């Protein structure tokens, strides 16, 4: 089965977007609110966390030789919020870039047959673990909107 590998470029573009954002924002701007409880830095730490989770699931699946979906309750964001808020803003940006790059590199060389099995077994979770650009860009859009809102005021 031929796999659509367009996720490689989508993920790379989202990683580049994280990098560009981190490079252009000051430490003060990294602490800009995004929504009620988050800041730009928290959003970046959140992206890094979920990229690391996707990387873990994919590596575990490869070690096992079969797609393995490790369930994680959605409340993890609420539980992790105080930890993410404690991460220094510049460090959150660095971790987000490092995590995205590690996952992108891993995805580029991930065994196509196992990726196909993962898709067949966990269609709904496929986008969560493979097309990381969707999750990254959603939060980057929120960051951009929050920063533009501040500029408009």
Image (cartoon, rainbow, N blue to C red):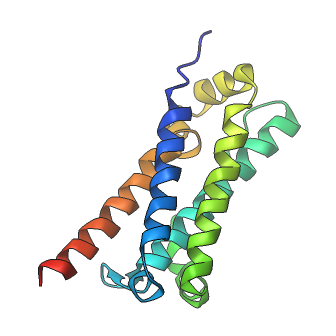
Q: Nearer the viewer, residue 61 or 131?
A: 131
Residue 71 seen: no
Is 74 positioned to the left or the right of 34 in the image? Answer: right
Q: Residue at x 59, y 90 (%)?
A: 86
Q: Is residue 21 above or below residue 138?
A: below
When asked about the image quadrant of residue 45, the answer is bottom right
- Residue 36 on image: x %, y %: 31, 84
Location of the N terminus by quadrant is top right
Location of the C terminus by quadrant is bottom left
Residue 146 seen: yes
Q: Nearer the viewer, residue 106 or 2?
A: 106
Is 69 positioned to the left or the right of 151 in the image? Answer: right
Q: Residue at x 79, y 44 (%)?
A: 59
Give the residue furthest to the left. Answer: 153
Give the residue furthest to the top. Answer: 1
Is 152 positioned to the left or the right of 43 in the image? Answer: left
- Residue 138 on image: x %, y %: 36, 56
- Residue 100 on image: x %, y %: 61, 54
Q: Nearer the viewer, residue 63 or 150?
A: 150
Q: Residue at x 43, y 65 (%)?
A: 21
Q: Residue at x 64, y 69 (%)?
A: 95
Is 128 positioned to the left or the right of 111 in the image? Answer: left
Q: Is residue 69 above or below residue 48?
A: above
- Residue 30 on image: x %, y %: 44, 81
When asked about the image quadrant of residue 17, the answer is bottom left
Give the residue furthest to the front. Answer: 24
């Amino acid at each position: 089965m031929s796999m659509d590998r367009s996720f490689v470029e989508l993920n790379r573009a989202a990683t580049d977007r994280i990098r560009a954002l981190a490079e252009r924002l000051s430490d003060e701007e990294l602490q800009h609110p995004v929504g009620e409880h988050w800041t730009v830095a928290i959003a970046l730490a959140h992206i890094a966390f979920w990229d690391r989770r996707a990387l873990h699931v994919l590596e575990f699946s490869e070690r096992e030789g079969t797609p393995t979906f490790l369930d994680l309750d959605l409340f993890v964001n609420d539980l992790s919020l105080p930890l993410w808020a404690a991460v220094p803003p510049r460090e959150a940006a660095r971790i987000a870039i490092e995590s995205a790059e590690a996952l992108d590199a891993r995805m580029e060389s991930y065994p196509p047959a196992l990726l196909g099995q993962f898709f067949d077994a966990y269609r709904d979770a496929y986008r969560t673990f493979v097309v990381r650009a969707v999750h990254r860009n959603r939060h980057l859009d929120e960051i951009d909107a929050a920063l533009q809102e501040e500029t408009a005021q």
